């Protein structure tokens, strides 16, 4: 263990006391105690859906109900779906997509799947027993104009009071970013795919 003399320890205490004062003042300045948030996880990096499911797990940990609608990844079976099944009816999961657009190669089919997923999403958004809804890869459906952007954004902006919603997927539309309370851009500094590593169970799905 590094040896710390008393002068260094005292400097550290003084520095941390100043930092705490700044933090306390910032927290004291917040006036809204609770608010249903619209969260957008976007960007080219890995982890957008993973972060959303982590948030859903946190909500489940507090005894709340969550809903998930997957817009694109229907062709993949995910470990998250199996894990969330352990929570019974507190975790409502709907896989509605039929795979990525380059797999289906059928725009009419893709649009129909997106519309069905959005209809299911609206059911969950209206369910008063659900505290958090994850709309996984909704950004992809919006990017390809499978859904009416203005209608989707209006619905999300006018969601019921106290409901949290997380939207994932690359290339979030500016209108959705503007409407959101929290937007996180996942960067792509380095990815194992570039080194030839395939998608792995427990990591990618």
Image (tube, helix red, strand yellow):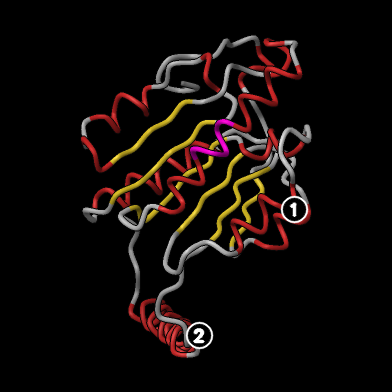
Where on the picture, by quarter, is residue 44?
top right
Q: Which mark is residue 200?
A: none
Where on the picture, by quarter, is residue 46?
top right
Residue drawn at (66%, 18%) of the image: 100
Residue drawn at (46%, 26%) of the image: 95
Instruction: Answer with left or right where residue 47 lies relative to residue 107.
Output: left
Find disc 1 in the rendering and name its residue.
150
Q: Nearer the viewer, residue 111 or 162?
A: 111
User: Can residue 35 be found in the magenta stretch?
Assistant: no
Instruction: Using a 10 Å C-alpha cutoff, classify the residue at mark 2 as few (fewer than 14 neighbours), some (14 to 19) or many (20 or more).
Output: few
Instruction: Answer with left or right where residue 41 lies relative to residue 16.
Output: right
- Give the image location of residue 170, x and y in percent: 69, 37
- Give the image location of residue 104, x and y in percent: 68, 11
Find disc 2 in the rendering and name its residue.
26
- Give the image location of residue 175, x and y in percent: 76, 56
Residue drawn at (42%, 21%) of the image: 78
């Amino acid at each position: 263990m590094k040896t710390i003399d008393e002068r260094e320890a005292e400097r550290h205490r003084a520095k941390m006391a100043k930092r705490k004062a700044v933090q306390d003042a910032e927290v004291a300045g917040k006036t809204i105690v609770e608010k249903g948030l619209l969260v957008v996880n976007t960007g080219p990096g890995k982890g957008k859906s993973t972060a959303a499911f982590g948030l859903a797990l946190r909500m489940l940990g507090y005894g709340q109900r969550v809903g998930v609608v997957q817009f694109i990844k229907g062709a993949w079976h995910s470990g998250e779906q199996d894990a969330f099944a352990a929570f019974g009816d507190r975790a409502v999961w709907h896989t509605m997509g039929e795979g990525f657009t380059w797999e289906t190669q059928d725009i009419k089919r893709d649009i129909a799947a997106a519309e069905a997923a959005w209809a299911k999403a609206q059911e969950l958004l209206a369910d008063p027993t659900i505290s958090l809804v994850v709309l996984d890869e909704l950004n992809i459906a919006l990017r390809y104009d499978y859904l009416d952007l203005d209608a989707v954004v209006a619905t999300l902006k006018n969601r019921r009071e106290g409901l949290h919603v997380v939207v994932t997927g690359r290339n979030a539309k500016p209108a959705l970013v503007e409407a959101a309370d929290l937007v996180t851009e996942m960067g792509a500094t380095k990815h194992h795919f570039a080194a030839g590593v395939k998608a792995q169970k427990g990591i990618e799905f």
